[in-house]
Image (cartoon, helix red, strand yellow):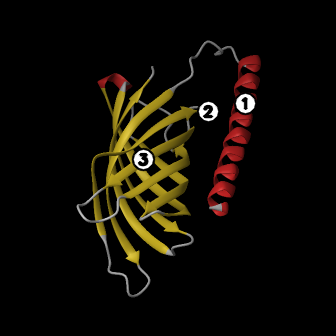
Amino acid sequence: MRPFVRNIGFALASLVVLSSVASAQRTTARNTSSASSTKTLWEIGADAGIGLELAVPDPAPKTNTLSLPIPAIRAGFFINDQWSLEPSLSYQYTKTEDVDALSVYRLGFAGLYHFDANRMHRQLYLRPFLNLIGVSFGGQSDSDTELGVGVGLKWPKLNGRMAWRGELNLARQMDAEITSLNVLWGISFFTR
């Protein structure tokens, strides 16, 4: 459990540092630019996904997973027109008769770099991410850290108020030594 507490502490400290840097950048931009009347932009969304484990330690079987309808929710905060910070959360609870319940949560932190700053155009993006994973089964609990990078595309709709979002990413769970290739499909809504 200590690695989990350490990982949560590291993630929260990183989020505080990134938030303070973003706040300082916004303050500087407001003081030096005449465009200080622009509102803060948020992206709220949900994703569904399909995952394929690429390398599984023996003798465990290879596992394919499909998570529907909404396995993860996310909220992106735009620092500027090209960068956004995006925390996410997912929770899964599975209970089968005569088998202990399985509970899995995933707390994620990502930074999206948009190659095109105009939200009215299709936007190609790069998304490095860090996920903290917790698992509870049969009275035992464990945690792991997952690192990855994704490449995706946003398709704007409704005059930029929403967008479809597709992504292909590669992720690596550090302790479990599991590498997975994932496809995500989601929808996003923007505050302006």
Determine crowd level at label 1: few under 14, some 14-19, many 20+ residues with C-alpha closer than 10 A: some
User: Is mark 1 in CB contact (under 8 Å) with mark 2?
Assistant: yes
Q: Amino acid at mark 1?
A: Gln
Mark 1, residue position? 25
Using the image, determine if residue 165 lies above or below residue 159.
Answer: below
Using the image, determine if residue 38 lies above or below residue 79.
Answer: above
* The C terminus lies in quadrant: top left
Q: Amino acid at mark 3?
A: Ser
Q: Secondary structure at mark 3?
A: strand
Mark 2, residue position? 79
* The N terminus lies in quadrant: bottom right
User: In the drawing, does residue 61 fall left or right of residue 118?
Assistant: left
Q: Secondary structure at mark 2?
A: loop
Mark 3, residue position? 90
Q: Amino acid at mark 2?
A: Ile
Between residues 164 and 17, which one lies in front from this camera angle? 17
User: Is mark 2 in CB contact (under 8 Å) with mark 3?
Assistant: no
